[in-house]
Amino acid sequence: MKTGKQQQQPRLSLSEEPTIRVGLWESVPRLRLGTSAWFMANGNPCGPGTYETAADHGTITLSTEAGIVVKADEHMIIEPLRGDAITVYDMPIGRSFHWERLQEHQYRGRLLCQCTESGCLRLINEIPLEQYLESVVSSEMSPDAPFEFLRAHCIVSRSWLLAQILRKTTSDATKAHKHKQQWTDATVHRHFDVCNDDHCQRYHGIGRVNTAAQQALEATRGQVLMYGGEICDARFSKCCGGITEAFSTAWDDREVPYLQPCADCATSCSDIRMQISDEESVERFIHSNPAAYCNVTDRALLARILPDVDRETLHFFRWRLDLTQEELQEILREKTGIDFGDIINLEPLARGASGRIYRLRVHGTKADEVFGKELEIRRILSRSHLYSSAFVVKSRVERGTVPSGFTLYGAGWGHGVGMCQIGAAAMAALGYDCKDILHHYFNGTHVLQLYP
């Protein structure tokens, strides 16, 4: 039953769809653009072709092989005509993660080129929110994913975005605490609302847009998740590993009522234990194979759920990573700037309900430091990022007291907070509808039509 408090109207009153600013590139010396149609650059008409945009001492130039076409001080507005698109070449995606690569993406709306303080270019896409979401839902998951899951994703992604925009005026984006604990979210972006990559939500342009995502957006237009009169900060990750995680494990130390841990299974499920109270129970859980929604072994179903870039990751519900002593030393020195000497131990000091570590002690012969939260731990132990911070460590001691290497046994892919994307898609494949999915991952919330 919904309480009166939960039925309050939101503080943000939107009478029409908002336009948002998506950061495509924060700092790049020059970039290549292309279009098959006419466009305007700071009010100057430009024809079809390939262009280069560059920054030079506060001046932005737009050039072809024949020379400079448009020159502007500090900023340039590139606007396609008649709803056409602009292609940006060699766009990095999956920055710092194991699937990082370069792609070309097409964008509708206006492109804003700005000079940064360092003399490089910042590229921003200004676009209506629903058009942005078309690309997000199409980029995050496959168009063949079950329709009820796509509907749920539309509501979750829209809610998260609007909640982030509302927090901008009141939140410090990057937090730093003792023991080198830090984390970031979308509020770290000062010059735009959200970025285009996995740090916020994947936004890979209109080339990814598909009919299924468009239909799901039409069915949920303007709808958001609400709790206690506020738009929900509705987080999601790829695979929780069997149990979702609390908000405070990944971000600041506050309890969010609708972002609480839950077993990723039906109510009657008995083989996923919610009591992860010590290292022994964590090890039991990570070495188990529970019947969670996100424990999908059917490759055909995964092919329906995951976009092409994610299908390359074969093992994520349970995974293993082997590191030699030399490899771990080098990675830690590269990522933290600290020479730990020989690594004696990786000691979990605090875990969340899913087993995810949010305080980890790295004990070496030359240094001893504590790191957190979960994303920082994933960052410092891998050349990209670990799949998750839900892992147990086994050291290989061959002689003396210094291990020759370490094996990490882990569970899940991502921070695990909120909606488990693979679990939610599997729920829809089993016949659950959009409301069932949202209630499972965001207990106590309800859906509200925010704008027509």
Image: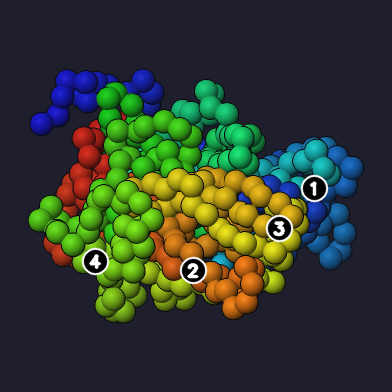
Percent coordinates x, y for residue 415 in the rendering = 43, 52
Residue 394, numbered label: 2
Q: Nearer the viewer, residue 413 or 176?
A: 176
Residue 16 higher or lower than 90, as above or below: above
Residues packed near mark 2 inside 10 Å, few (<14), some (14 to 19) or many (20 plus): some
- Labels 1 & 2 near each other (Cβ < 8 A): no
Residue depth check, mark 4 versus mark 2: number of the one nearer the observer: 2
Q: Dot 4 corresponds to which residue?
A: 290
Which labelled disc corresponds to residue 328? Answer: none
- Camera-near label (4 vs 1) is 4
Circles 3 and 4 in contact, beta carbons < 8 Å: no
Pointer 1: what residue? 120
Crowd tier of the residue under label 3, counting other residues whose Cα lies within 10 Å: few below 14, some 14–19, many 20 or above: few
Which callout, 3 or 2, points at the residue further toward the start of the chain?
3
Left or right position of 65 against 87:
right
Which residue sits at x=21%, y=35%? 444
- Ranked by sequence position, the earlier of labels 4 and 1 is 1
Give the spatial CA distance, label 3 vs label 4.
Answer: 39 Å
In this view of the protein, can residue 55 be seen by the observer? yes
Name which of mark 1 and mark 3 comes first in the sequence: 1
Q: Residues within 10 Å of mark 1 (few under 14, many from 20)?
A: many
Q: Callout 2: helix, strand or loop?
A: strand
Give the residue type at disc 3: Thr
Q: Is residue 71 above or below residue 85?
A: above
* Mark 1 residue type: Cys
Q: CA distance from mark 1 to mark 2?
A: 45 Å
